[in-house]
């Protein structure tokens, strides 16, 4: 059976479904306040404690963005080598003792250009953004060494290297010509994060920036999204080649099909990772009609997902 799906403007503006048959989605909009996130900073010598000037507060967006809209502001100075700034909150309502594949989408405002030169590292690509989940509350600890050092109690990796508890989802650079604050979205759609809950069905959600840029990084977070899909092991190993998305580029009509797998739903995002709409086909084939742009299609089948990029011109 083929389903032909047209996406009118009104449908494009609908928010994502919070709970559906194959996933749980947690979305936090910082225009409404801090959403119970707490901020913190690590990766510095104890004697540098007064130098990082860390700030975490809910503020209005800067010009030329919508100055009537609020966002979660996070800023700090990297005094030398490293600085990790983060925000965290507890989430509840997950299935106990379940293994999830999790995708994150973090929308934020940045003023930092790409391909620029900075002290210690680039102001854009030299500041890596990470997201992850832990069973314990992420917090700072003091490592007793020749010079006492403030570090994290979780494995976040270091700078551009991911860790067991946090994965890299991008950097804070916007474009080569960036000179004012602009909106950007980082995500891990191409490499979902694997997380197993304990008996409580709770977790700690953490987002942070791991900096090698030895100067100030100031960002405004507008929203964050975490999409949890239970992985039962029954459909592990799903490959991008299992789904055909054609033609690409397209003049507007896009066909999505699979010879072997049902398509439970297709989540459509713009190329920056901002959610647009969810489509629920009834079989192994569907047809999408999309306006001119570039898109990411998150195709969900059973307990697995693949991501495809399409261009409509």
Image (spheres, helix red, strand yellow):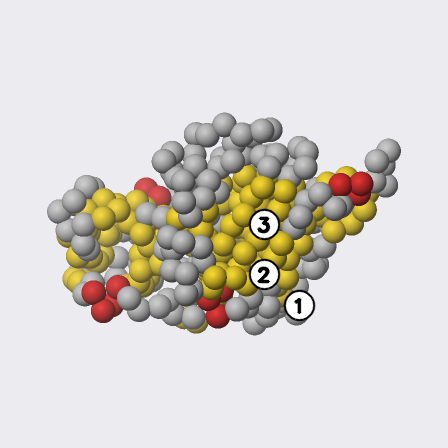
- Residue pointed to by mark 1: 199
Disc nearest the viewer among 2 and 1? 2
Whether residue 36 is visible to the viewer of this picture, yes or no, is yes
- Residue pointed to by mark 3: 75
Q: Residues within 10 Å of mark 1 (few under 14, many from 20)?
A: few
The image position of residue 21, as x and y in percent, is 41, 69
The image position of residue 40, as x and y in percent, is 67, 54
Q: Which mark is residue 57?
A: 2
| 198 displayed left or right of 252 | right
Q: Secondary structure at mark 1?
A: loop
Mark 3 → mark 1, Cα distance in angstroms: 36 Å
Pick the residue in front: 215 or 105. 215
Furthest-left residue in this view: 251
Q: Name the residue located 49 percent from the left edge and 54 percent from the top edge.
A: 220
Among numbered discs 2 and 1, the one appearing first in the sequence: 2
Quick check: 123 above or below 117?
Answer: below
Q: Name the residue located 44 percent from the left edge and 51 percent from the top edge.
A: 109
- Quadrant location, the C terminus: top left
Among numbered discs 3 and 1, the one appearing first in the sequence: 3
Q: In which quadrant of the rendered view does residue 267 lie?
A: bottom left
Pick the residue in front: 236 or 17. 17
Q: CB under 8 Å between callouts 2 and 3?
A: no
């Amino acid at each position: 059976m083929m389903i032909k799906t047209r996406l009118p403007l009104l449908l494009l503006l609908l928010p994502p479904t919070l709970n559906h048959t194959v996933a749980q989605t947690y979305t936090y909009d910082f225009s409404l306040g801090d959403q119970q996130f707490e901020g913190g900073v690590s990766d510095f010598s104890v004697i540098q404690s007064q130098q990082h000037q860390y700030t975490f507060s809910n503020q209005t967006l800067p010009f030329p963005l919508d100055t009537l809209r609020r966002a979660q502001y996070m800023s700090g100075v990297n005094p030398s080598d490293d600085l990790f700034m983060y925000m965290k909150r507890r989430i509840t309502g997950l299935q106990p003792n379940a293994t999830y594949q999790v995708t994150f989408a973090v929308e934020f405002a940045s003023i930092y250009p790409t391909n620029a030169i900075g002290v210690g590292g680039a102001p854009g690509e030299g500041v890596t953004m990470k997201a992850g989940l832990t069973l314990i509350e992420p917090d700072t600890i003091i490592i007793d060494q020749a010079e006492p050092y403030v570090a994290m109690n979780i494995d976040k990796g270091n700078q551009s290297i991911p860790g067991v508890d946090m994965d890299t989802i991008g950097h804070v650079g916007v474009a080569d010509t960036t000179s004012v604050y602009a909106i950007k979205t980082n995500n891990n759609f191409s490499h979902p994060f694997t997380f197993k809950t304990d008996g409580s069905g709770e977790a700690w959600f953490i987002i942070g920036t791991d900096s090698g840029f030895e100067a100030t990084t100031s960002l405004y977070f507008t929203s964050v999204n975490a999409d949890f899909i239970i992985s039962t092991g029954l459909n592990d190993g799903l490959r991008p080649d299992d789904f055909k998305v054609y033609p690409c580029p397209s003049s507007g009509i896009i066909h999505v099909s699979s010879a072997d797998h049902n398509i439970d739903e297709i989540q459509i995002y713009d190329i920056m990772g901002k959610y647009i709409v969810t489509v629920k086909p009834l079989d192994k084939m569907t047809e999408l009609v999309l306006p001119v742009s570039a898109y990411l299609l998150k195709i969900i089948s059973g307990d697995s997902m693949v991501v495809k990029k399409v261009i409509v011109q």
